[in-house]
Amino acid sequence: MKLPDTQNSLIARLGDTADAEAWSEFSQVYRPLIVRMGLAKGLQRADAEDLAQTILVSISGAIDRWQPDGPAKFRTWLKRIADNAILNALTRKKPDLAAGSTSVDQLLNNSLRPDGPDTKLLQLEYRREIFHWAAKRIRDEFTETTWQAFWLTAVEAQPAEAVGQTLGRNRGSIYAAKSRVMSRLLKQIDQFETGESS
């Protein structure tokens, strides 16, 4: 699965610090991703949360310098900032690992390998966060039975026959429910990628 780009229209809106909706949408996707990356690298939960806040504040001050036509895609730019901030937090001796005034320039100037294991971690965490974000957005569009048919088969990987017995449905209706939700979920993710409203 290709790692989706953050749509340029959302990034452009981030340049307007008064656009609370754009920052909210951006934060819903990226804050949990940064926190999970920090946790995976060994930070305590509170330090990872503080680090995410620090990174988002740094991004808000530097977003106008990122160029969509530049050499780095937005997710690459963000990954470098997050990787370097996590590395800085892990190597500090102070108890409050995530505190400090690290600028985006400092974070970008400390480069990590672009093909290292952190890249795969970022991609995995990004896909998870986009999935959770999109699932929350579409959840209320489906009945509880339809959603459970999807969730139990697609997410929990339970066999359709067992899910059908649990939900009192036949195997065909389980597959149909899973397909309907997956189709809508993929459409929601595509709308996020392209910047179209849902």
Image (cartoon, rainbow, N blue to C red):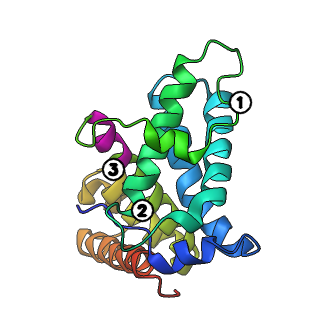
Mark found first going from the N terminus, 1 or 2 = 2
Type of amino acid under label 2: Phe
Amino acid bearing label 3: Gln
User: Which residue reaches farthest right?
Assistant: 18
Q: In this figure, which residue is indicated by the disc labeled 3? A: 123
Q: Position of residue 169 (x, y in %)?
A: 35, 69
As rendered, which of 74 and 26 lies closer to the eye?
74
Residue drawn 60% across the image and 55% down it: 59
Q: Kindly tell me whether residue 166 is visible in this rendering.
A: no
Residue 75 sits inside the magenta stretch: no
Q: Is residue 119 magenta?
A: yes
Q: CA distance from mark 2 to mark 3?
A: 13 Å
Q: Label 2: few (<14), some or many (≥20) within 10 Å?
A: some
Badge number at residue 142: none
- Disc 2, SS: helix
Q: Secondary structure at mark 3?
A: helix
Q: Position of residue 3 (x, y in %)?
A: 30, 60
Residue 74, numbered circle: 2
Q: Residue at x 40, y 81 (%)?
A: 194
Magenta-tinted stretch: 117-123
Which amino acid type is shown beneath numbered disc 1? Ala
Hey, which quadrant is residue 41 in on the image? top left
Identify the disc placed on residue 99: 1
- Left or right: 103, with 173 as reference point: right
Question: In which quadrant will I find the N terminus?
Answer: bottom left
Q: Is residue 189 above or below residue 95?
A: below
- Foreground residue, 127 or 81? 81
Residues at circles 1 and 3 in contact by the CB criterion of under 8 Å: no
Whole-number angstrom distance, CA of label 1 to CA of label 2:
24 Å
Q: Residue at x 68, y 51 (%)?
A: 57
Label 1, secondary structure: give it: loop
